C-alpha cells in the first residue's frame, strides 16, 4: 500500500471537490451508529465549510420521491443548486455525478453520506480503484449500527481511503491562522457547529472585552 504522508498529501481547498450522498430522511430514520442530530449538525458544518473555502460541492440523493429530500440544513447552503437524484446505490456508477466531479478538475475527492456501509463505501472503493485520492468525513456519515460504520471504515482504509472528521478537514483547508481570507467564516462555523470549541471561543471573546477590575478607565 502506498502510504499517504508528506505535506503534499494534506488537503487543500483549491484541489478539493466534495460529494455529499443521500443525507435524506429515510436514511436518518434508521441511523443507529451516531446521534442523528449530530450527523445533521456535522453535515451542515461540512457544507458550510466547503462553500466558505470555495470547494465545489455535488449533492446527490437516491430515489428522493420515496426517501425524501436532502436535509434543508445542506441545500440551504447551496440555494438553487441541482441535487442529482439516482437509482444506483453506488454513486460512482452514476455518470452524471462522476461527470460533475470530473468537470471541476479537482483531484482530492471528499465524500460523506448515509449509509457508511453502503452508499459511502461503494463509491469510495470504486473511485480509489480509478486512482482518485479519496477522503471520507466519518462524522458526517452514519450507518445502521456502530458495527456497520466501523467495519465500513476498516474496509475503506484497507482499500486506501483517508479518514477525517469535518473539523479536521476545515482546519486542514485553513492550515495557517495568518491566512485571513476565510477566518470569519471559519469562526462562524465553529460557533454554530463545533459545540464546546465554539462556545469556548465566544467566552474567550467575552473575557478579552471585559475590563480588568480596578483598572483605570
Image (spheres, helix red, strand yellow):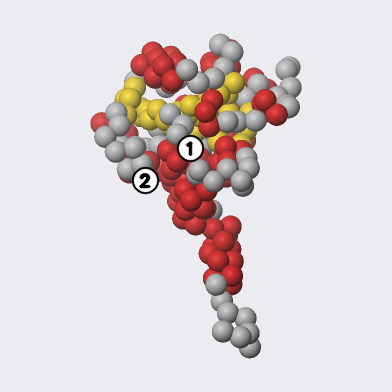
Image vertical order of residue 179 relative to residue 190, above or below: above
> Between residues 50 and 135, which one lies in front from this camera angle?
50
**Tag count:** 2
Q: Can you tell which quarter of the image residue 100 is in?
A: top left
Describe the element under mark 1 as helix, strand or loop: loop
Q: Quadrant of the C terminus?
A: bottom right
Q: Which residue is mark 2?
A: 73
Say which residue appears at 62% left-offset and 40% top-offset. 175
Identify the residue at image location x=63%, y=88%: 214
Image vertical order of residue 195 relative to residue 33, above or below: below
Q: Tell which residue pokes out farthest to the front in this image.
A: 217
User: In the rendering, at what x and y percent does residue 80 appear?
Assistant: 26, 34
Q: Position of residue 107 (x, y in %)?
A: 54, 20
Identify the residue at horizontal 50%, vertical 44% (top origin): 182
Can residue 39 be seen at all in this image of the molecule?
no
Residue under circle 1?
53
Amino acid at each position: 500500500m502506498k502510504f499517504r504522508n508528506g505535506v503534499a498529501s494534506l488537503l487543500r481547498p483549491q484541489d478539493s471537490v466534495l460529494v455529499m450522498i443521500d443525507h435524506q430522511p429515510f436514511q436518518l430514520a434508521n441511523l443507529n451508529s451516531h446521534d442523528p442530530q449530530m450527523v445533521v449538525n456535522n453535515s451542515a458544518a461540512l457544507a458550510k465549510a466547503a462553500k466558505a473555502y470555495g470547494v465545489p460541492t455535488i449533492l446527490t440523493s437516491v430515489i428522493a420521491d420515496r426517501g425524501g429530500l436532502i436535509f434543508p440544513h445542506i441545500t440551504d447552503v447551496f440555494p438553487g443548486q441541482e441535487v442529482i437524484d439516482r437509482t444506483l446505490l453506488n454513486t460512482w456508477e452514476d455518470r452524471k455525478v462522476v461527470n460533475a466531479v470530473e468537470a471541476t478538475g479537482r483531484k482530492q475527492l471528499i465524500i460523506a453520506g448515509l449509509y457508511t456501509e453502503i452508499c459511502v463505501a461503494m463509491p469510495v472503493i470504486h473511485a480509489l480503484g480509478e486512482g482518485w485520492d479519496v477522503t471520507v468525513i466519518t462524522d458526517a456519515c452514519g450507518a445502521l449500527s456502530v458495527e456497520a460504520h466501523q467495519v465500513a471504515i476498516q474496509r475503506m482504509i484497507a482499500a486506501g481511503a483517508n479518514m477525517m472528521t469535518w473539523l479536521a478537514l476545515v482546519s486542514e483547508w485553513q492550515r495557517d491562522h495568518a491566512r485571513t481570507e476565510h477566518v470569519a467564516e471559519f469562526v462562524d462555523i465553529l460557533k454554530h457547529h463545533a459545540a464546546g470549541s465554539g462556545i469556548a471561543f465566544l467566552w474567550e471573546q467575552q473575557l478579552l472585552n471585559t475590563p480588568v477590575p480596578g483598572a483605570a478607565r
